[in-house]
Amino acid sequence: MYRSFERYQPGQSPLHRADPRVKVVVTFALIGGIALTPTHAWPAYPALWTLVAGLAALARFSAWRMARLGAVALPFMLAALPLLITVPGPAWTLGGGIAISQAGLARFVAILLKSWLSVQVALLLTMTTSFADLVWALGSLRVPGTLVALIAFMVRYSTTLGEEAERLLRARAARSAHAEGRPAGGTLFWRARVAGGMVGNLFLRSYERSERVYAAMLARGYAGEMRRLTPPPLSWRAALAGAVPLLWLGIVELAAMLWWQ
Amino acid sequence: MFLKPILAMHIPDGFLSAPVAIVGWLVTAVLVGLALREVRDRLGDRQIPLMGVLAAFVFAAQMINFPVAGGTSGHLIGGTLVAVLLGPWAAVLVMTTVVAVQALLFQDGGLLALGFNVFNMGILAVFVGYAVYVWARRALGAQPQAMLIAAALGAWVSVELAAMATALELAISGTSPLDVALPAMAGIHALIGIGEALITVGALAFVRQTRPDLLGAPSAGVARQSALIAAGLVIALAIAFASPLADADPDGLERVAEDKAFIDKAEDPVYEVLPDYTVPGIDDEALTTIIAGVIGVLIVAGIGFAVPRLVRLNAPEKVRQQQ
């Protein structure tokens, strides 16, 4: 059975009930602020982490769990690894002629910390906001309506088409018996052609499904535009709640740029 | 599984510096805005169900993989395939949606980095893949397999170029040295691109057999338009590549003026948007030159798009077709 992949965790915490528009704006602002932190402002990172942990506590998630989930992007650190040896400046020499640049190490660690913090912030949004609320928030934040509708459609049908893809994969697996110790199937090109045929098959099923969906929408009075509810005005309380983390971020970044560099 | 995030080109947050990420958002916003208008005019009210379901198709098609060797497997990114099937503008919107949902729901790629992630996989890959496809198809002429060979070339080049653009963006951000990142990304993706090309060809061959009506020849107008855009994007990238490596000597005329000691007689222009091709407030010299270059290209491109449209305003308003 195709699993639902949504990361949303239903709940009644203050963060779950916060206005989704505020959550989206605050998320982007926090991630932008984290990116602006100067490399050598080391006290800023624990200060930013207290903010993340505080928000996690508000959502009733354990900070340890968020810390673990925040590591999903860390394999990408391979891209930043060469900094350790290529950044010029004073270096520590290790055995075997390898020298670790101090400035390079600082930059590498800063990139990892920023990535780890940013992923946790993005996760907090995804885990406390249902997909419908997220789409609604994007729409009321003036993301073009067509794009918002496409995002909503994609998520609605990715489960359906994901199941189609699983049936194709199961059918291939069922026809791919092979004896132990002998290569299964044909050459690489043959395997690729089979996979390509499956993708083409899936495309036609999707294309024809989109035609049926369109006909069904027309039958229900669709006239070229998705109808949306008028967003209710933003309450003062919701806006103020969003200002608190931003204020904390502002103080940390100011201190980082003025004193901690 | 461990290698997937590196191979998949989705840059997480933290790996792009803030100015670079903002440039990515600006460039992407302009091009996606253009795509929204082009597609609305062409597809009308079918656009949302068609592209929305096909975005889900790309997502599901990425699950279909085939074993390559040593436990790795090839799977689809999809830009060129969708561009050949739907045309480049609709493909831009489909791929933008895919990349945006991956970032919003799965943290596959960052939110601040989303601008350049959409640019690499949804705009650059689509236009370059499509332009190569159109060019190769025309060059091969009456060859019976022309369409498939052309699509394979387009798919391979699109993956390779998107990977190189990713390496460049990381290098400009100071995250990864260009002389390591570029060969590594280009090398790995030369192989991944072969997988992409094979699946693209397999899928197109299947569609051609079953529903040949869906695969028309590319229209001359769209072909020319996408060739221009692809060329523009590649030139902009090439300039960005070259600029930090270029030497500090000023351009030829200024050099002669300095040598002959008449540079003092030069007058500053009345307006200086980007003095000496730098952006005020950014210290890193290479970075500021590149950003200034990108902003300059954007301004020129904006004028290029705006002028014909302003001229068209004076023409009698064309009658919109209903249904």
Image (spheres, rainbow, N blue to C red):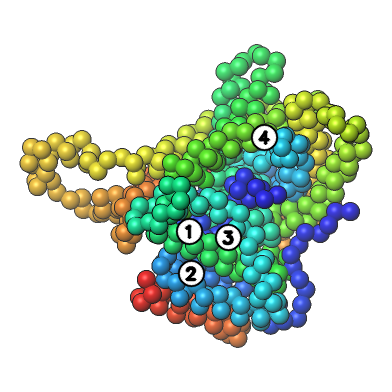
Per the image, the residue denoted by label 1 is: A108
On the same chain: label 3 and label 2?
Answer: no
Per the image, the residue denoted by label 4 is: B196
Query: Callout 2: 10 Å neighbours few (<14), some, many (20+)?
Result: some
- Which quarter of the figure has residue B255? top left
Q: Marks 2 and 1: which is nearer the front?
A: 1
Q: Is residue A180 left or right of residue B59?
A: right
Per the image, the residue denoted by label 3 is: B111
Image location (x, y in percent) of residue B182: 48, 40
Distance from the alpha carbon under mark 4 to that under mark 3: 26 Å
Query: Callout 1: 10 Å neighbours few (<14), some, many (20+)?
Result: many
| Residue type at numbered disc 4 | Glu
Instruction: Tell me: residue A194, above or below residue A248.
Output: above
Q: Nearer the viewer, residue A232 or B320?
A: A232
Distance from the alpha carbon under mark 2 to that under mark 4: 37 Å
Distance from the alpha carbon under mark 1 to that under mark 3: 20 Å
Residue located 44% across and 44% down the image: B178
Q: Marks 1 and 3: which is nearer the front?
A: 1
Extreme residue toward the front, this view? A95
Q: Say which label, 4 or 3, has the lower sequence index.
A: 3
Per the image, the residue denoted by label 2 is: A33
Do labels 1 and 3 touch, CB within 8 Å? Answer: no
**Residue B253 visible in image:** yes
Query: Callout 3: 10 Å neighbours few (<14), some, many (20+)?
Result: many
Distance from the alpha carbon under mark 2 to that under mark 1: 18 Å
**Residue B23 visible in image:** no
Instruction: Tell me: residue A24, above or below residue B150.
Output: below
Q: Is residue B50 left or right of residue A235?
A: right
| Residue type at numbered disc 1 | Phe
| Residue type at numbered disc 3 | Leu
Instruction: Tell me: residue A62, above or below residue B112.
Output: below
